[in-house]
Image: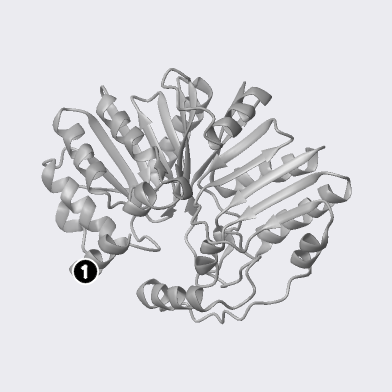
Amino acid sequence: MEQELLINAKETFTEIIKQIKKAKKSILICMYIWRDDKIGNLIAKELLQAANRGVKIKIVKDKAGSVFEKIELDKQSFFHKQKDLISLIKGKFLSLLYYRDNKCPNNQLKNNNLNRLLEHKNIQTDFNQERHDHSKYFIFDDQILILGGINIGNKNEAEKAPKYRDYMVKLKGKKIVSYFYKRAKGEKSPDPTRKIEFYFNIRQKKLYEIKSKILELLEQAQYSIDLEMAYFGDSDITDKIIESCQRGIAVSIITSKNSNVQNDLNNYVLKKLIKKTDNNLRIYLSKELIHSKFICIDQNTFFIGSANFHKLGMESLSELNVLIKNSSVIQSKWKKWQAKHLRECDLIAQENSLNYNKLIALTEKVLC
């Protein structure tokens, strides 16, 4: 079975567009954020061409993600053009907390690509429900699955925006896609003996598998834990990282120097980690925006997906992660990327290098 680690937006969208062009029968997309920008419209145009040649397409887009579409960057949502009072209130609060400097107007512009998608007989869309489903995945012809942390849109092209760092995983094979469907429907329980296994948080079913798996992986580490994480805050995971470091495991963390949201809570957690481990872990701060949700245990077990290390990701949102063991292909590509990636980062040696507002950190701890 073919496996591939897709690193950052360029690789990911190049592969996604390639698969849309090759699709013969079906495409399924589950997405949290879909921006009305160059990438968002390029994907839409390619989907329209696929639909024109007879490919059946289903798009499940979470309305909850529209809050961020309308307050970040150029503030244009692809699907959610209508005003909504609850989303507007949430957006105003988040804008006040994080995006005060973004003066771009958020009047939603008309989009002919959207209208064509909605009217096409071969395209089924579901975008009016707030599922709070933070997972992101694509399935092509029931034999190629691409999943991970990257939404549709390209923040890398936005003016003055830092480059995003994130991952997706491509898995090819009818058997693995069939197994994914069964796991997603609850027809199969996770099998710890499998080399590739999927773990779900499903909000509607009150099913949360991912946190317990993360704690188990951290507990099982024998010599190294490498983490790349956008957002922290879950106290059990923080404590397990501390415990792992105290028992002699080499722990390294890459995260953003200036996160787009919950930067104060992140710095509070990082400061605690440094203090409680006597500086025996390595924390690297990137000038780029780390959007990754990535764990590597002992250099050969990878846990990659959409779930952040905060309470929302562990206990509230629907999420999707994949566990991959002993993949030389993924290991080799990641190690080469990590060497380059670390050169972009600053190693933090002292806790006083991290500053945060206590009131904001407390607010984020409650909300996030």
Amino acid tagged 1: Asn
Instruction: Tell me the quarter of the picture where residue 240 sits.
Output: top left
**On the rendered structure, is 313 left or right of 365?**
right
**On the rendered structure, is 300 left or right of 104?**
left
**On the rendered structure, is 94 left or right of 116?**
left
In this view, the residue in front, 291 or 335, is: 291
In this view, the residue in front, 348 or 177, is: 177
Q: Residue at x 12, y 48 (%)?
A: 275
In x, y percent, where is residue 219?
Answer: 25, 28
In x, y percent, where is residue 266?
Answer: 28, 56
**Res 194 visible:** yes
**On the rendered structure, is 219 left or right of 194?**
left
Badge 1 marks a residue whose secondary structure is loop
**Res 99 visible:** no
In x, y percent, where is residue 195?
Answer: 48, 20
The residue identified by callout 1 is 357
Instruction: Tell me the quarter of the picture where residue 263 sits.
Output: bottom left
In this view, the residue in front, 271 or 97, is: 97
Quadrant of the frame with the N terminus:
top right
